[in-house]
Image (cartoon, grey):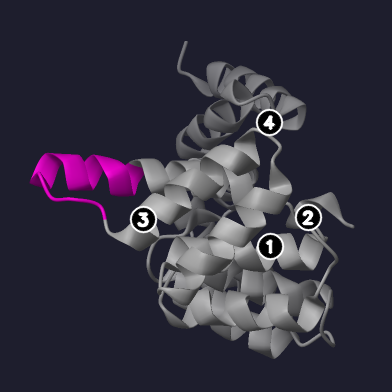
Amino acid sequence: MNTAWRLGAAAASLALAAALSGAAQADTPLKSSDLATQNAVANYNAGNFVAARSEFRRAAQKGSRLAEFNYAMMLLNGEGGPADVDEGKKWLRRAADANMTHAQYVYGKMYDDGQFVDKDPAEAHRWFLRAASQGHVQAELALANQFLDGRGTARDNVQAFAWYKKAAEGGDMTAQYVAGSFYERGGDGVERNLNVARAYYAAAAAQGDPAAKLKYQQLSAELERSRPQ
C-alpha cells in the first residue's frame, strides 16, 4: 500500500494531544470516545494494530472525528486486518463531513491522485477548498497547485499566488520557494520585490531546500551589486 496514505498515527497523536490538553485546562472529564481514541493511539504507536483498529472502530461509532479518520486510514491501508476500501472511504467521508480539516484534505487528495476512486480533480478542488479555507496548510498548497495548473478549476495565477503565500506563511517549504519565485519575477498582480523574494527563499533554505539556498545566494549577490557605491 502507498505509504503516502499512512497518515493516521502522527495526525492522531497531535490531534489527541490537543484534545487532552483542552480537556485538562477546562477541568472536564474525557468522553468515553476520547478515552477509547487515546487507547487506540497508544496501541497504534506501540505497533498493536489489531487492538488499535478495534478501538478506533468503537470510538468512531461513538462519533469521534479523530477515530473516524484513523479507522478509515487503517481500513484503507490494511493495517490491523484486511483492507476494506469501501468501508474506509465511508469513514473518511464521515470525518470530512464532520469538518475535520485533515480528513477533508486527504479525501480531496484521494480524488486528485485517483487512488481508491476515479480521478476527479474538480471534486478534489472542492475538498481542498474546504480545508484550505480553515487554514489547513497542505490543502492550501494543493489548492495553489491546482490554480497554477488549471486542474479541477480554471487556471488563475493570482489565486495560485494567494494560496501559495498562505501556505508559505504557514511554514510550508515548497510554498515558500514558489512565493519567492513570484516575487522574484513579478507579474500576475505581484509587484517584483527581490528583498521579499530573498526572504522567502531564506525561509525555505532554512528548512533544507538546496534550490532555495542557491536562489538566496544569487539574490543576495544581485542586491549587493545594485547598492549605491
Residue span colored magenta: 18-30
Residue position for label 3: 34
Disc number at residue 73? 1
**Residue at 82% over, 61% down:** 78
Could you tell me which residue is drawn at 74 percent across and 80 percent down? 111
Q: Which amino acid does label 2 sit on?
A: Glu
Q: In front here: 63 or 185? A: 63
- Tell me the distance, in whole angstroms, between the alpha carbons under discs 3 and 4: 42 Å
Residues under numbered marks 2 and 1 in contact, where contact means CB atoms less than 8 Å apart: yes
Seen in the image, is 1 located left or right of residue 204? right
Are circles 3 and 4 on residues that touch, CB within 8 Å?
no
Q: How far apart are marks 2 and 4 (CA)?
A: 38 Å
Between 46 and 16, the one nearer to me in the picture: 46
Report which residue position mark 2 lands on.
79
Q: Where is residue 100 in the image (x, y as percent from the top left)?
A: 44, 68
Q: Nearer the viewer, mark 2 or mark 1?
A: 2
Observer-nearest of 185 and 109: 109
Q: Residues within 10 Å of mark 4 (few under 14, many from 20)?
A: many
Residue 132 lies, in percent from the top left, at 47, 68
Task: Please report whichever mark, 3 or 4, sits nearer to the chain's N-terminal start.
Answer: 3
23 within the magenta span: yes
SS assignment at label 1: helix
